[in-house]
Image: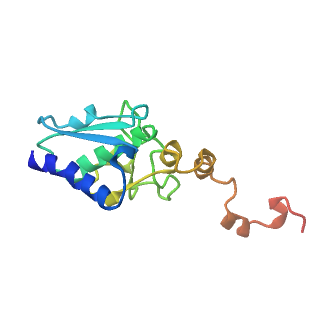
Amino acid sequence: MFRAWQYPRYFRQLAQDHGISTEKYTVKVYVVYGGTSPDMAAHSRGSRKGRVATAFISLDERNPGYPLVTIAHEIGHALGALDTYNPETSHSTHPEGFVEPFADPLYPQRFAELMAVDIPIAPQVEQEISQLDQLRVGHRSAADMGWIAPEQADLFYTPPAIAPEEKLDTPPSEQGVEE
């Protein structure tokens, strides 16, 4: 309880020290610690309309990265990002739920995408992150939040029909170029 009281004071003071008004924060986040359900995070929500996020964290949570990714994920929703996982299976959708959707081999992925939350390590098999450096913001999520243009995300998820290195191995006549 003491830490829960300390954190907002610390961040308000930090903002004040840097001349930033706390009234102009983009997203307000409420973190609720309580309960012992193994998946308290499933009750968490973020709203773009209210620019507010509420993250529920179980008191029994042993994975230090899970509460952080839950908070970051809900902030993503408050900034306009949509989920990039299948709500029925909770598995990352391809390609938007993968940070490296065109890796060869595709599995295992090295990172979790912010709005998919877990790291795809095999088809229909995912692993929870244990620290924030395993998390990345994918192009679709960045576009949803207004960080990049939607067209830029579309380009990322639409690989060219012929990659530049393939053109080097293809005779010009097959590329549609006169020799």
Asked if residue 176 lies left or right of residue 19, the reply is right
Q: Residue at x 66, y 67 (%)?
A: 165
Decide: is 48 above or below 139. above
Decide: is 111 above or below 80. below
Total labels: the figure holds: 0
From this viewpoint, is residue 124 visible?
A: no
Q: In which quarter of the image is residue 53?
A: top left
* Residue in front for this viewpoint, 57 or 53: 53
* Image spot of residue 166 (x, y percent): 68, 64
* Residue in front for this viewpoint, 73 or 95: 73
Asked if residue 59 lies left or right of residue 148, the reply is left
* Image spot of residue 28 (x, y percent): 33, 41
The residue lying furthest to the left in this view is 2
* Image spot of residue 147 (x, y percent): 52, 50
Q: In which quarter of the image is residue 115?
A: top left
Asked if residue 77 lies left or right of residue 168, the reply is left
Q: Which residue is drawn at 75% across and 65% down?
A: 170
Q: Which residue is drawn at 59% across and 52% down?
A: 156
From this viewpoint, is residue 156 visible?
A: yes
* Image spot of residue 42 (x, y percent): 27, 34
